[in-house]
């Protein structure tokens, strides 16, 4: 029998063949870079030509413990040899064990396991609407409107995309789930003006990711909590990108001392495997009874085992404190770079979720490719923001290497940009 381990080398197609096949066979959802990765170790990835890349993106926040982590590899191997799937018609020990751990670290009461962040957010929206129905049946006055924030991103399924602000994500798929209104980010007056008994939930990314690494203000977050408490509406916090320790705490809302009614986790949750979780209070959980929601694959033995190992590793290696320390160091180095390059507008973030905003979207776009040429992986979000979501194993030496590459790449891109602008001026 053929060993079908896909490493991008002799066992699979080369880069050119893969590109040609994907162009013919795949729905064209991604504009990929012309690099084929075949293996990884720690905070580095290796391409099919043997080149190593410093990864400052960790698969968009997923590979929090880097690549080929011995604890993760050991758990995957042992669990794969034991039990992969049972369906949710039966018990296995992993769900309760993981749920116990997740409720402890988040301050929540109950968990729904699924397969991705967008699925977790869909469950959160369904809980909010069902909870409102429950309250109305109990004689309370509450509607079905959901207040979401401008520049938000919650996923790509129909409900999640309805609460995602950017028009290009929503407009091709209309009509979307109705009853969503967008409020300007961190505008307390606008939030209060939009809120009424018609609202069943306020949806917040505590630290907006796709929107450009913008933290919610203490005042806005507190106002959202107060308003929800006044009517029984639910406060929903999307921690898909910011959760599981990335910001230096298990959830970003813990920096504020404010507890939501529902929160969602994914990305870093299961060490690189697809897993999501929706966590909620006992009050919110009253709205869901058997048969109302479900999933075939969610909370399977393999992903539960790996998630437990990931959380245990983060705890035992003291990575929350590490993320805070190295994240602060990273932002200090980026702010020092700002003094050298006028194109840098601002550096912001929490822990190892960092954005560096530039004053030109064309320069920002070219920086991703330029950094790849320096063998460093980053990406761009919100047009002008360079985003850094490195593995939690990153060291200060790795940061120094990445910032040095940024310095060189910025210099190269800006020089080319200036020459091109001069050529255009000359042509006019």
Image (cartoon, rainbow, N blue to C red):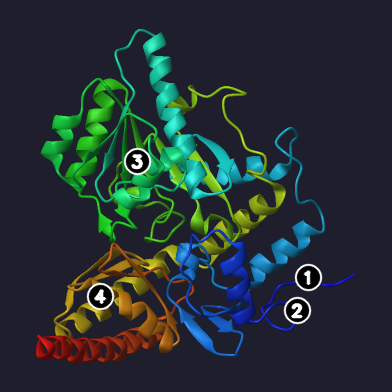
Image coordinates of residue 369 in percent, x first then y, are 38, 81
Confirm whether residue 399 shows in the render: no
Furthest-top residue in this view: 139
Q: Is residue 201 above or below residue 302?
A: above
Find the distance from the CA under tag 3 to the CA under tag 4: 28 Å
In the rendered image, the quadrant that contains the N terminus is bottom right
Q: Are marks 2 and 4 in contact (CB under 8 Å)?
A: no
Residue 163 got which mark? Answer: 3
Of the two numbered discs 2 and 4 on the same chain, state the one appearing first in sequence: 2
**Left or right: 52 with respect to 137?**
right
Q: Is residue 108 left or right of residue 181?
A: right
Mark found first going from the N terminus, 1 or 4 = 1
The spot of residue 221 in percent (x, y) is: 24, 42
Label 1 sits on residue: 4
Q: CA distance from mark 1 to mark 4?
A: 41 Å
- Marks 1/3 in contact by CB < 8 Å: the verdict is no
Residue sitting nearer the eye, 287 or 410: 410
User: Whole-Å distance between the Cαs marked 1 and 2?
Assistant: 7 Å
Asked if disc 1 and disc 2 are in contact, CB closer than 8 Å, the reply is yes
| Residue bearing mark 2 | 11
């Amino acid at each position: 029998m053929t060993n079908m381990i896909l490493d991008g080398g002799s066992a699979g197609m080369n880069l050119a063949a893969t590109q040609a096949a994907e162009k013919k066979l795949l729905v064209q959802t991604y504009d990929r870079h012309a690099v084929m990765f075949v293996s990884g170790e720690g905070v580095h990835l290796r391409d099919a030509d043997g080149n190593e890349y410093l990864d400052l993106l960790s698969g968009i926040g997923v590979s929090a413990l880097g690549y080929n982590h011995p604890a993760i590899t050991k758990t995957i191997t042992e669990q794969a040899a034991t039990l992969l799937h049972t369906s949710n018609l039966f018990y296995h020990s992993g769900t309760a064990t993981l749920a116990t751990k997740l409720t402890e670290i988040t301050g929540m009461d109950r968990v729904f396991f699924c397969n991705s962040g967008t699925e977790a957010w869909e469950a959160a929206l369904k809980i909010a609407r069902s909870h409102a129905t429950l309250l109305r049946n109990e004689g309370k006055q509450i509607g079905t409107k959901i207040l979401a924030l401008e520049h938000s991103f919650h996923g790509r399924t129909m409900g999640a995309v309805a609460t995602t602000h950017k028009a290009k994500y929503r407009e091709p798929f209309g009509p979307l789930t109705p009853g969503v209104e967008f409020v300007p980010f961190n505008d307390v007056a606008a939030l209060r003006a939009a809120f009424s008994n018609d609202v069943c939930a306020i949806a917040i990314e505590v630290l907006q990711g796709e929107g450009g690494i913008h933290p919610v203000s203490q005042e806005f977050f507190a106002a959202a909590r107060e308003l929800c408490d006044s009517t029984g509406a639910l406060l929903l916090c999307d921690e898909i990108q910011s959760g599981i320790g990335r910001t230096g705490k298990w959830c970003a809302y813990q920096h504020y001392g404010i507890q939501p009614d529902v929160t969602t986790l994914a990305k870093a949750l299961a060490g690189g495997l697809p897993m999501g979780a929706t966590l909620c209070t006992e009050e919110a959980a009253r709205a869901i009874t058997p048969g109302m929601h479900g999933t075939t694959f969610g909370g399977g033995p393999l992903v539960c085992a790996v998630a437990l190992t990931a959380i245990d590793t983060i705890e035992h290696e003291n990575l929350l404190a590490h993320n805070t320390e190295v994240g602060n160091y990273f932002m200090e180095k980026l702010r020092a770079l700002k003094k050298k390059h006028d194109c840098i507008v601002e550096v912001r973030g929490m822990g190892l979720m960092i954005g560096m905003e530039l004053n030109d979207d064309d320069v920002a776009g070219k920086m991703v490719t330029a950094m790849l040429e320096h063998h460093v992986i980053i990406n761009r979000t919100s047009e002008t923001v360079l985003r850094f979501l490195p593995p939690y194993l990153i060291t200060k030496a790795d940061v120094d290497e990445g910032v040095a590459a940024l310095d060189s790449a910025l210099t190269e891109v800006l020089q080319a940009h200036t020459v091109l602008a001069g050529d255009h001026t000359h042509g006019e």
